[in-house]
Image (cartoon, grey):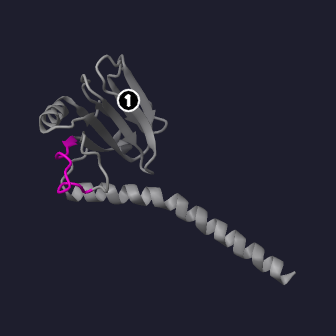
Amino acid sequence: MRWLVALLVFSATAIAAHLAVLNAIPARIMATAQSRMAERGVPLNGWNAAERMTPQTQTVVRPSPDLAYALCRFDTSDGPVLLSAPTSQTYGSLSVFDGRTNNVFVASLREGSAFRGVIVYPRGQPPGEVGEGQEIVEMDGPGLALIRRLAPSAETHAQATALVDEAYCGNP
């Protein structure tokens, strides 16, 4: 009987510890990513285009060298955030990640798409107006938005980077 009680206590403790770790890790990863980006000067509520991916510029283990990346850090604590990016003839996407690293939204940026932006708003505080072609996502706290565009050459990377100037990340 004593062994059974000990086994049950051990199992309950192991399960509780496992669930605690699984619950804490994603938020910790995102918090670390946010603070490192802030240290590197990535602004809050503004798009930041990355250099072309080469073995010398890789800070992530395996980013694709055929894609151009732009990143926006945002926080819905002060209200809704509008994220938009122009479409283009080649592959492009806009993804939104919440504070637990969950991908909560993805849109195509390929020419012909009806996408005109996404409004990310705090839970329980929906935006008053939503424009045509705009999506809405309910999310609390900090998050990241990522634009990816096909850019296999230096020329196409420059074209994709120029499109970042037309993108928007900020209050609607």
| 20 w.r.t. 144: above or below | below
Quadrant assignment, res 69: top left
Which residues are the magenta region?
Answer: 47-59
For the residue pair 166 and 172, the one nearer the viewer reads as: 166
Report whether 145 appears left or right of 65.
right
Task: Determine the residue positioned at 21% across, 50% down.
Answer: 42
Asked whether the viewer can see residue 128, the reply is no
Residue 56 lies in the magenta stretch: yes
Callout 1 crowding tier (Cα within 10 Å): few <14, some 14–19, many ≥20: some
Type of amino acid at the residue the image marks with label 1: Ala
State whether residue 34 is above or below residue 80. Answer: below
Give x and y (percent) for residue 6: 77, 80
Quarter of the image where one finds residue 117: top left
The residue that appears at 35% across and 18% down in the rendered structure is: 114
Q: Residue at x 35, y 22 (%)?
A: 115
Q: Nearer the viewer, residue 139 or 146?
A: 146
Q: Is residue 26 magenta?
A: no
Q: Position of residue 17 (x, y in %)?
A: 60, 68
Q: Is residue 155 left or right of residue 73?
A: left
Q: Is residue 106 visible?
A: yes
Q: In the image, is residue 86 above or below residue 146? A: above
Q: Secondary structure at mark 1?
A: strand
Q: Which residue is mark 1?
A: 107
Most prominent secondary structure in the magenta stretch? loop
| x then y, percent, for residue 30 | 38, 55
Quarter placement of the C terminus: top left
Q: Position of residue 66 (x, y in %)?
A: 25, 40
